[in-house]
Image (cartoon, helix red, strand yellow):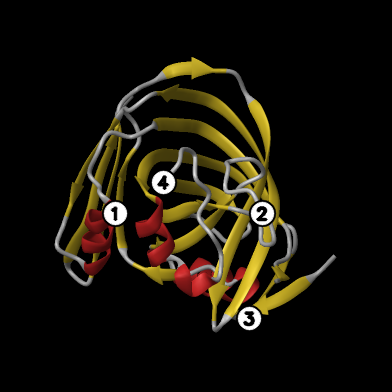
Amino acid sequence: MASQLIQGRMVHLPVRVRDATVCSAFFPVRADAARAVIAYSGLDAAEILPGKAVCALVFADYRDSDLDAYHEFGVAFLVRPPGSESRGPREVGAFVHWLPVDQVFTMEAGRSLWGFPKELAEIGLRLSSPYKRCVVRKDGRLVVDLLLRPGVPAPPARLPLTAYTHRDGVTRRITGRMAVHGVQARPGGALIRLGNHPVAKELSELGLPKRALLSVTAERTRMEWDAAVTL
């Protein structure tokens, strides 16, 4: 079992999340704009339709994990596996472009173990009602206010995970597994308000806010993340 010392604590891989609520909204964006945003990674955006890529906004309440309890918000893009000739959606992974959290330990662990672009921000979650809301502020400025409407119940599922990161000039692939329960999904279902932070400006230039392709909430989520592989 691989392990690494983080802030005086030994963290073992795979890192486990035993209980979390995870909420996601997937938005269509211009593929050329998405490619411009993630060009630094060397990865290519996957096209779900000609000229259309997908930007995912994700927020999570990690209640019990190897990296403690914390809130997280993510901006990610669906990307093609490196070396793939197809620009279609098959076997895509998620390139994590921005990943603020509200606790220092998970920030340091995420950076050191996987190269995740974690940084500290103020992340307010409202998850107790059928409507799920996340408000992210960074440096005293609003980044995004995202509200997800209730969806239609879906069955529990076990899913593979593939994420890509880029940090210090190195692109990495991280694989894992996820089990979800208490799932609801619906077309659209997302209301988004952008603030005046530079990340909000970047999202606006991608074409947000617009109608989401799909919104998904999972009340009870378990995950495992393996060690990163350098590409």
The single residue placed furthest to the bottom in the displayed view is 168
Seen at 24% across and 58% down, the residue is 205
Mark in front: 3 vs 1: 1
- Could you give the CA–CA distance between mark 3 and mark 4, rounded to whole angstroms? 47 Å
Question: Quick one: SS at disc 1?
Answer: helix
Seen at 68% across and 55% down, the residue is 84
75 left or right of 135 in image: right
Q: Earlier in the sequence, mark 3 or mark 1?
A: 3
- Give whichever of 22, 126 is nearer the camera: 22
- Give whichever of 15, 36 is nearer the camera: 36
- The 10 Å Cα crowd at callout 1, few under 14, some 14 to 19, many 20 or more, is many
Q: Earlier in the sequence, mark 1 or mark 2?
A: 2
194 left or right of 108 in image: left
Residue denoted by label 1: 206
- Kindly identify the amino acid type of the residue bearing the numbered disc 1: Leu
Residue denoted by label 2: 85
Residue denoted by label 4: 51
- Give whichever of 36, 9 is nearer the camera: 36
Seen at 43% across and 61% down, the residue is 35
Q: Earlier in the sequence, mark 4 or mark 2?
A: 4
- Kindly identify the amino acid type of the residue bearing the numbered disc 2: Glu
Q: Which x, y percent locates residue 118?
A: 46, 68
